[in-house]
Image: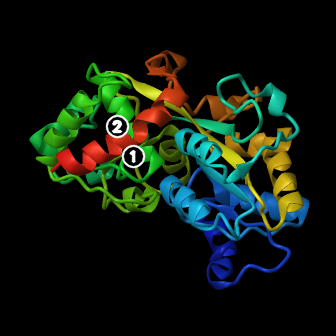
Amino acid sequence: MKHTVLSALFATAIAAPALAEDAICYNCPPAWADWASMLEAIDEKLDIQMPHDNKNSGQTLSQLLAERASPVADVAYYGVTTGIKAGNEGVVEPYKPAGFDEIPEGLKDPEGKWFAIHYGTLGLFVNVDALGGAPVPQCWSDLTKPEYRGMVGYLDPSSAFVGYAGAVAVNLANGGDLGNFDPAIEYFNALAENNPIVPKQTSFARVVSGEIPILFDYDFNAYRGKYEEDGNFEFVLPCEGSVRVPYVMSLVADAPNPELGKRVLDFILSDEGQAIWTNAYLQPARPVELPADVAAKFLPASDYERAVAVDYAEMERAQAAFGERYLNEVK
């Protein structure tokens, strides 16, 4: 279903207050990862209405910490490093949904404080028609060239998880590792000379409109633009390589509606729920085979060999220090 149609279904939910029987999810924005279809399915299949929420990962954790004494949310969704932080901070409660055992080791907390629900691969979401005749960039290094001045966007890596994932990707691509982010700092300073756009929130619509011609983003958003929006969009997996990153969910500790939260998490990890993510060009956390027509829309598997997994616990431990360095050193 076209997202423009789905957005109309949620238009009234923007201003409507949450009802007492609603489950609350922090960071479940309809414009990201096709949460629109997931929220609609949860409503239709479970009769649970979850108002959408446009926080990013960092904002979600900050809100959970601020509300520790009186939680508002029932479940939370975030990048894996933020999920690890939430588990360490004690603002989430262990829960193992049906299907938990099928999630690969390393992509879930053994106690169920967080667990992957899907994967994305970081690359470039490009609005080809907005490039003004410039070629589609093929490498991270291309983005510092003068012809892309003012065209490149990336989410703030000191706040948004996708921004930090992009920093990890360019750092590895330039010879760094999770213990040495000097190459990333050098890269972002070089990119700063090219007048980049640095929003804090998901920016799919700004790429579609052409306001941000090139965005550090996940493959699933780029494929959604390519196959579901009017325009000429491409996903580029940069020549130097990139990273695959899971997104995770948790049950909030002392949630106001824990049983509803558990039902939501069970559905998201079910065969039916995981299949919804594949329709949005996401790799599911459980071994659910991609439909052939969806698989055919991805870049070749040989391209995806350039994308690697990392030690996500180490990635989490490095995140705060990198965020501080970015704020202090990137001009």
**Is residue 188 shown to the viewer in this render?**
yes
Residue of label 2: 167
Task: Classify 10 Å Cα crowding around label 1: few (below 14), some (14-19), many (20 and above).
Answer: many
Q: In x, y percent, where is residue 96?
A: 83, 39
* Quarter of the picture holding the N terminus: bottom right
Compared with residue 112, is residue 194 higher up or lower down, i.e. above or below?
Answer: below
Compared with residue 292, is residue 89 higher up or lower down, i.e. above or below?
Answer: below
Task: Classify 10 Å Cα crowding around label 2: few (below 14), some (14-19), many (20 and above).
Answer: many
Q: In x, y percent, where is residue 283?
A: 64, 33
Q: State the CA–CA distance, disc 1 to disc 2.
A: 6 Å
Report the label total: 2
Q: Residue at horizontal 70%, vertical 22%? A: 105
Q: In x, y percent, where is residue 289?
A: 75, 27
- Which SS class for mark 2? helix
Q: Amino acid at mark 2?
A: Ala
Determine which quarter of the picture holds residue 270: top right
Q: Amino acid at mark 1?
A: Gly
Q: Tell whether 314 sits left or right of 139.
A: right
Determine which quarter of the picture holds residue 16: bottom right
In this view, the residue farthest toward the front is: 69
Q: Which mark is residue 176?
A: none
Residue of label 1: 163
- Which SS class for mark 1? helix
Q: Residue at horizontal 56%, vertical 55%? A: 32
Seen from the viewer's position, the closer of residues 155 and 11 is 155
The answer to whether marks 1 and 2 mark residues whose Cβ atoms lie closer than 8 Å is yes
Q: Tell whether 21 sits left or right of 26.
A: right
Determine which quarter of the picture holds residue 319: top left
Q: In x, y percent, where is residue 286?
A: 76, 30
Q: Residue at horizontal 15%, vertical 51%? A: 331
